[in-house]
Image (spheres, rainbow, N blue to C red):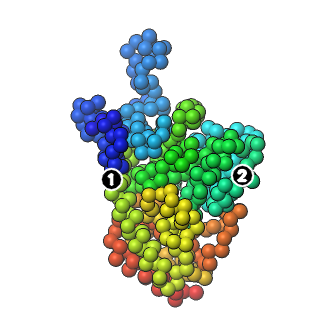
Amino acid sequence: MGKDGLTGKGVNTRLTHSGNKPSDFFGFVNPPVAHGSTILFPDTATMVSGTQKYTYGTRGTPTTDALATAIDELEGSAGTIIVPSGLAAIVVPLLSFLKSGDHLLLVDTIYYPTRRLADTVLAGFGVEVDYYDPLIGAEISALMKPNTKVVFTESPGSNTYEVQDIPAIAAVAHAAGAIVMMDNTWATPLLFKPLDFGVDISIHAATKYPAGHSDILLGTVSANSQCFDQLYQTFVALGVCSGPDDVYQVLRGLRTMGVRLERHEKSALEIATWLAGQPGVGKVLHPALPGNAGHDIWKRDFSGSSGIFSIVLQGATTGQAHAFLDALDIFGLGYSWGGFESLAVHVSLNDRTVSNRDYGGQVIRLNIGLEDVADLKEDIEKGLRAAAIST
Ligand SMILES: Cc1ncc(COP(=O)(O)O)c(C=O)c1O
């Protein structure tokens, strides 16, 4: 099936068939992995005319086009760039739309390396940086300045998963002449489509659910028609292109992302609900559980939840948090998420500057993988028992 036949089709049909047309490459179901820096031109006339589709490897290849087209199909975007990591997918749009003297607003629950980028590199270039509370909604108007150029959102936020009122924030930002970027990694475009809610630029660490196997680093940035050209020109200027094998692997991962996410969602919800009744567990920070900050907005705007959330070990010490983690066998101790395997980490919230809430204990982030839920519960029980007897 070609791209043209996908309009109005269900999301799993689009995941299965978008990106490349088999008929463009001898009927092969998958696109070629184009290893290329140099691309030859037939003659000088073609070279100077600017009519040849591919001109140099940094600007795009049939492999990057296949993934970018598939992501555009999911995001409803005018164009997508592919970059070497999720963090690069945050760096490139910020560098594209900010210059010295501009003001940048970011949500306080941001992925920490985004904050580090803003406070070091961007602030060093003369960008004014402020943070806002994730529950601010339309009251973000009080923080807008004449020089505010970008509002950077991530919803739900990292580690504590507060859900933001993106349409309200976008309306205020646009009225003030700013554009809105969103790190949409948690939801993927399957569970939330940022551009439908007023966001101009949607960002993904494709490292997580799109790749799905903890073996690839990649990022995607998708923009509406007003923003894509400026984004693409900066992408080309910076030379942050990605290796074709990694790009291919993410397209491969997309084909199964729908079914993987269904399983991640189901298992994570079952474990989160169960954890809410376990001794030693205070809050369960999961957007789909009633009582979580922004739960009503999640219900209004999202079509589901993914497989990562946090728990609070009620009144626990750091030693108890470590005892919990060290007792786990199936959950690995490691960064990142969205892969097939369960992971757990102890989360620090010390970087937050404007939304310091008391969560009542140590926060542990759980990435629920594709293992059997009964085994994962048994593993967590071991952790909770270890935390209870540790001091
Ligand atoms: C919300 C979020 N955005 C972006 C990233 C960055 O992705 P990468 O690890 O590919 O740089 C991460 C990584 O953990 C993340 O959690």
Q: Is residue 369 left or right of residue 89?
A: left
Numbered tag placed on residue 256 in the rendering:
1
* Residue corresponding to mark 2: 141
Which quadrant holds residue 32? top left
* Three-letter code, disc 2: Ser
Which is nearer the eye, 96 or 162?
162
Question: How far across and how far down the image is residue 364, in percent?
Answer: 53, 72
* Three-letter code, disc 1: Thr
- Circle 2 crowding by C-alpha within 10 Å: few under 14, some 14–19, many from 20: some
Q: Is residue 54 above or below residue 300?
A: above
Which quadrant holds residue 293? bottom right
Q: Residue at x 39, y 21 (%)?
A: 40
- Asked if the residue under mark 2 is in contact with the one under mark 1, i.e. CB atoms within 8 Å, the reply is no
Which is nearer the eye, 319 or 351?
351
Question: How far across and how far down the image is residue 81, in percent?
Answer: 49, 38
Q: Residue furthest left?
A: 27
| Circle count | 2
Q: Residue at x 40, y 18 (%)?
A: 41
Question: How far across and how far down the image is residue 207, in percent?
Answer: 45, 52
Q: Is residue 252 above or below residue 306?
A: above
